[in-house]
Amino acid sequence: MSAGGVPSGPPKRRLGCFAVLIALVLAPVGAVLVHAVVPPPITVLMVQRLFEGEGLHVRWRGLNDISPDLVDAVIAAEDARFCEHDGFDFEAIEDAMEDNARGRRVRGGSTISQQTAKNVFLWPGRSWIRKGLEAGYTVLIETVWSKRRIMEVYLNVAEMGPGVYGAEAAARHWFGKSASELTRAEAARLATILPSPREYRAADPGPYVRRRARAIQANMGEVRAQGLSDCTS
């Protein structure tokens, strides 16, 4: 009781809970605002791989220093409607659900925006909690960041080999050159291994990577011709 006989505990507890809720809302917004201009630090996946005994090779490069062919390649391979959607490609999700229901090779419907949100702010896994947070962060980055920034961050944090993250480190690891010097064929190979970068090799690839990379390279021409990567210019 206060001096006047009015309970003071409950209002203080409510105020504390309210402050916690505000902090939980503002923290993600603040992080997204910061990384709209500041390169993200080490990610949860990178830390996990370090504990698993892998190295850490990452070199940030602005999009101007990454071959446009790699942008076309990842759009062709991962998210053809990247410039059109607001973070979620519901058509791709529906197609993936149909394919999976028919027993075909399991595929996902995640956009580049969703993958970026997961890679930068969250942890690997398939729990509903993580997927819910991923959706929230996807809305935030699509609201705050430009499509160009989303692509730039994605190409700097995506896993592209054992302990290798981002286009620059991947280009040097697999091909011994800078990301700005990647050829169309090399860009297509990097895009090919994105779903399973620890299983496949971009250099001296096996039959699957060669076949898939040829298909991606053919689709890269359509990406350029139809302006599907124009939002990253």
Image (spheres, rainbow, N blue to C red):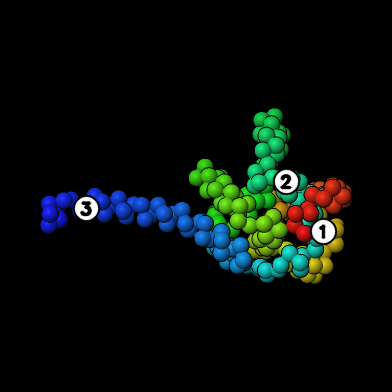
Looking at the image, which residue is at 42% across and 57% down?
Answer: 23
Q: Quadrant of the C terminus?
A: bottom right
Amino acid, disc 1: Asp
Residue 14, x across and y down, in percent: 30, 50
Looking at the image, which residue is at 68% across and 41% down?
Answer: 89
Q: Does residue 126 sit above or below 28 in this rendering?
A: above
Residue designated by label 3: 9
Residue 188, x across and y down, in percent: 81, 55
Which label's residue is closer to the chain start, 1 or 2? 1
Q: Nearer the viewer, residue 203 or 88?
A: 88
- Mark 2 closeness class: few <14, some 14–19, many ≥20 residues within 10 Å: some
Left or right, 60 with respect to 74, comes to left
User: SS class of the residue under badge 3?
Assistant: helix
Mark sitting on residue 69 = 1
User: SS class of the residue under badge 2?
Assistant: loop
Which label's residue is closer to the chain start, 3 or 1? 3
Q: Nearer the viewer, residue 5 or 83?
A: 5
Kindly report which numbered mark, 3 or 1, lies closer to the viewer in this rendering: 3
Which label's residue is closer to the chain start, 2 or 3? 3
